[in-house]
Amino acid sequence: MAKSKNLLRRRLNVFWNVICLEEYMTCRIIPRGLRVQIFPSFEETPTEFKTQWEQVLHECSCKLMLLLKKHNLEELESIKLQQKQICDQLKEYELNEEFKRLDNDLKTFMENLNIEIMQVKKRKFERDTHDYDNQNVYLWNKKKYTAFRNRGYRGGNAKPSGSHNAKGTSRQSERDSYSESDMSGRDVADCSPAN
């Protein structure tokens, strides 16, 4: 059952990754984590050049998103095959009371995980949409050393202190997601423990 639970968890995550990548591509929005932040080192950058440069960065990120979607779809198929093998092995235990109890626990776990993933995805999408609304997608004026300063870099031989932002909160805690209403009509049934 532990392997089945891990596969279901992975399948749910990969499923929502695909759905969200599709939504981002439809809205022509690049998630923060896939935005290429490479800029020329001009003292002053003409507006027209900036616009053209950002279009190239956007195209690059779109290609990365397509590649990720393709990879996720392949992984989803692989997970489905593994799940089928496990289901075939567990068929003989379907009438067992302990199996039924574990199966119900697994269904509850998956329902809660699905809600949690959707909330994270919704927050991220709203954050990324906000970046576009405020024209804060590409960070032209940021100095290169600020990345180290924000991570606790003090100069000399000191090393960055880890994955914390300037506010001191973990990047893990900044995750965002979709709500059920945003995803109405999407086929989540394929990710339910019963399948």
Image: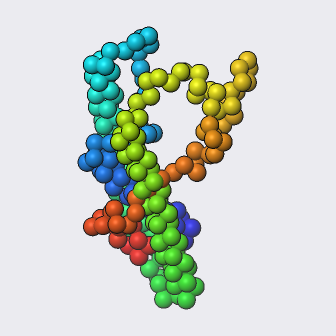
Residue at 53% of width from left, 21% of height from top? 143
Does residue 135 appear anywhere in the picture? yes
Which residue reaches farthest top? 43
Does residue 14 appear anywhere in the picture? no
Which residue reaches farthest front? 134
Residue at 58% of width from left, 48% of height from top? 172
Query: Foreground: 15 or 34?
Result: 34
Image position of 13 with respect to 168: above or below? below
Image position of 148 with respect to 33: above or below? above
Residue 171: % across, % down: 58, 44
Where, quadrant-wise, is the C terminus in this rendering?
Answer: bottom left
Residue at 51% of width from left, 51% of height from top? 175
> Residue 13, located in which quarter of the rendered image?
bottom left
Residue 21: % across, % down: 34, 48
Say how many tags the image has: 0
Which residue reaches farthest right? 157
